[in-house]
C-alpha cells in the first residue's frame, strides 16, 4: 500500500487541524490516497468540551502568557 507523506515542519494547531479536515474530506471522496503528516505543533494544550479552568494545574491565562495556545 502506497501512501503520501507530507512533512509540514513546525505548525500551529489550528492550521494543522484545518489541513487534516481537508485531507479527510478529500480521502473520503477518493480523490487522494492515504496521507501521513509529519509535523511538530507549536505550544498547545487541547481540552475537552466539558473542561473547566479548575481542571488546569496552571491557569489558562498563565499558559497563554508562556506562549501556549488552548484549543477545545
Image (tube, rainbow, N blue to C red):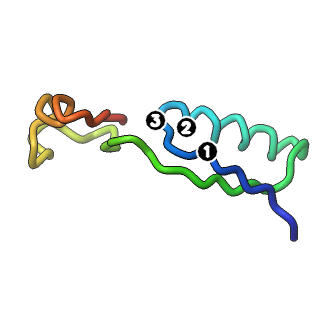
- 20 w.r.t. 5: above or below: above
Mark with earlier residue (3, 2): 3
Which residue was labeled with disc 1?
A: 8
Residue drawn 46% across and 35% down?
Answer: 12
Q: Callout 3: 10 Å neighbours few (<14), some, many (20+)?
A: some
Task: Spot the residue most to the right.
Answer: 31
Distance in Å between CA atoms under marks 3 and 2: 9 Å
User: Residue 61 placed where, x, y %?
Assistant: 14, 28
| CB under 8 Å between discs 1 and 3 | no
Indicate left or right for 50 with 30 as reference: left
Can residue 30 be seen here? yes
Which residue was labeled with disc 2?
A: 17
Indicate left or right for 69 with 53 as reference: right
Which residue was labeled with disc 3?
A: 12
Distance in Å between CA atoms under marks 1 and 3: 10 Å
- 63 w.r.t. 37: above or below: above
Residue drawn 48% across and 50% down?
Answer: 40
Amino acid at each position: 500500500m502506497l501512501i503520501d507523506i507530507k512533512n509540514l515542519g513546525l505548525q500551529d494547531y489550528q492550521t494543522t487541524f484545518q489541513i487534516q479536515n481537508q485531507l479527510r474530506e478529500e480521502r473520503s471522496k477518493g480523490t487522494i490516497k492515504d496521507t501521513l503528516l509529519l509535523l511538530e505543533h507549536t505550544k498547545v494544550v487541547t481540552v475537552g468540551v466539558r473542561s473547566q479552568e479548575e481542571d488546569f494545574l496552571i491557569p489558562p491565562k498563565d499558559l497563554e502568557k508562556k506562549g501556549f495556545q488552548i484549543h477545545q
